Image (spheres, helix red, strand yellow):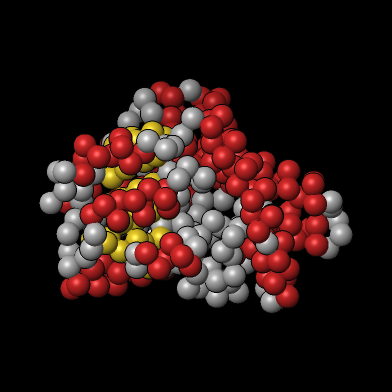
């Protein structure tokens, strides 16, 4: 397998188009999905999945292959990625892994921690304690509770809260959880440059709004209606696709189409903001490429260095 290319970015930043350009430029590639909603069958327009015409240009993996009534997790994606990367090695093709789910990428290059999800109430308790005590006293409280937390940076409030909440909820030190994390499938030092598309907020806002309007025009409401006919249990992850709850509310007669559209756009803008925060905090060492028409040109200098 030639070394993989990882392309992350916020929703509507042009990741899929860039992945296609990269694959066409290099040849011998397969595009692999790293988006938690594009895995589901039934959501094509609403999740901006590659079109059948685009999928015909380059082989695609892990798109639209999961029944929307089923659950899916980062652990399930990592298990599937093991098979995808094995196939790529055997076939001698380069995976171009692209999507907007930051946790998928960080689990791929750092390993998937088995720490249970921390309840909001526990996190709020930790943040309140830090606010009342200050960093130094909070650090002393943390060490009294969990001596294994001595390696936590006492000047980093986010890491202090994380160590406190994990021990408070699980009774096991964050250091011990880290020691149990299996090795990553793609240690970052063994990959080619991992890329994050950087998008100007105003440019991205316009893209999000235009794309949502296009989704409606091309039949996103029909997708939502078909999904409702499946009688999928409430709370199933697939029903959380951006815009889906609002469109379903419109189909039930609860809101107008205009209201549903505005809600869907607002949800997407908020999600893009959270994505940018994640990429900034968790993927600070990735190469930044400006999103837009010149993204491929900005990438060109790196392309000649590919092994």
Front-lying residue, 155 or 46:
46
Q: Is residue 34 above or below residue 127?
A: below
In the image, taking residue 85 as reference, residue 79 lies left or right, namely: right
Q: How many numbered tags mark residues here?
A: 0
Location of residue 266 in the rendering, given as x and y in whole percent from the top left corner? 67, 41
As drawn, the residue found furthest toward the right would be 253
Q: Is residue 284 above or below residue 252?
A: above
In the image, taking residue 116 as reference, residue 149 lies left or right, namely: left
- Name the residue located 41 percent from the left edge and 60 percent from the top edge: 33
Location of residue 269 in the rendering, given as x and y in whole percent from the top left corner? 60, 40
- Name the residue located 38 percent from the left edge and 48 percent from the top edge: 18
**Residue 266 visible in image:** yes
Location of residue 15 in the rendering, given as x and y in whole percent from the top left corner? 42, 48
Q: Is residue 22 above or below residue 84?
A: above
Front-lying residue, 14 or 264:
14
- Name the residue located 30 percent from the left edge and 35 percent from the top edge: 298
In the image, taking residue 256 as reference, residue 59 lies left or right, namely: left
């Amino acid at each position: 397998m030639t070394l993989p290319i990882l392309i992350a970015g916020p929703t509507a930043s042009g990741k899929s188009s860039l992945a296609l350009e990269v694959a066409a430029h290099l040849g011998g590639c397969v595009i692999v999905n790293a988006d938690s909603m594009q895995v589901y069958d039934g959501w094509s327009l609403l999740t901006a999945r590659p079109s059948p015409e685009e999928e015909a240009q380059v082989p695609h993996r892990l798109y639209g292959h999961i029944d929307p009534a089923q659950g899916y997790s980062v652990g399930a994606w990592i298990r599937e990625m093991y098979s995808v990367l094995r196939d790529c090695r055997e076939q001698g093709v380069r995976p171009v892994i692209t999507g907007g789910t930051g946790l998928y990428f960080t689990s791929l290059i750092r390993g998937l921690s088995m720490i249970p999800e921390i309840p909001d109430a526990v996190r709020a308790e930790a943040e309140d304690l830090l606010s009342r005590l200050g960093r130094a006293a909070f650090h002393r409280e943390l060490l009294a509770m969990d001596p294994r937390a001595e390696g936590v940076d006492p000047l980093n409030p986010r890491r202090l809260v994380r160590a406190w909440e994990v021990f408070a909820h699980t009774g096991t030190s964050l250091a011990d959880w880290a020691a149990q994390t299996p090795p990553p499938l793609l240690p970052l030092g063994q990959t080619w440059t991992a890329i994050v598309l950087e998008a100007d907020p105003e440019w991205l806002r316009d893209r999000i709004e235009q794309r949502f309007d296009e989704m409606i025009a091309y039949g996103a409401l029909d997708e939502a209606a078909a999904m409702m006919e499946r009688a999928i249990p409430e709370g199933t992850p697939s029903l959380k696709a951006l815009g889906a709850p609002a469109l379903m509310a419109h189909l039930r007669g609860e809101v107008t189409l205009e209201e549903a559209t505005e809600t869907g756009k607002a949800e997407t803008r908020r999600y893009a903001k959270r994505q940018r925060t994640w990429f900034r905090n968790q993927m600070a060492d990735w190469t930044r490429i400006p999103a837009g028409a010149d993204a491929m040109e900005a990438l060109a200098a790196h392309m000649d260095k590919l092994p």
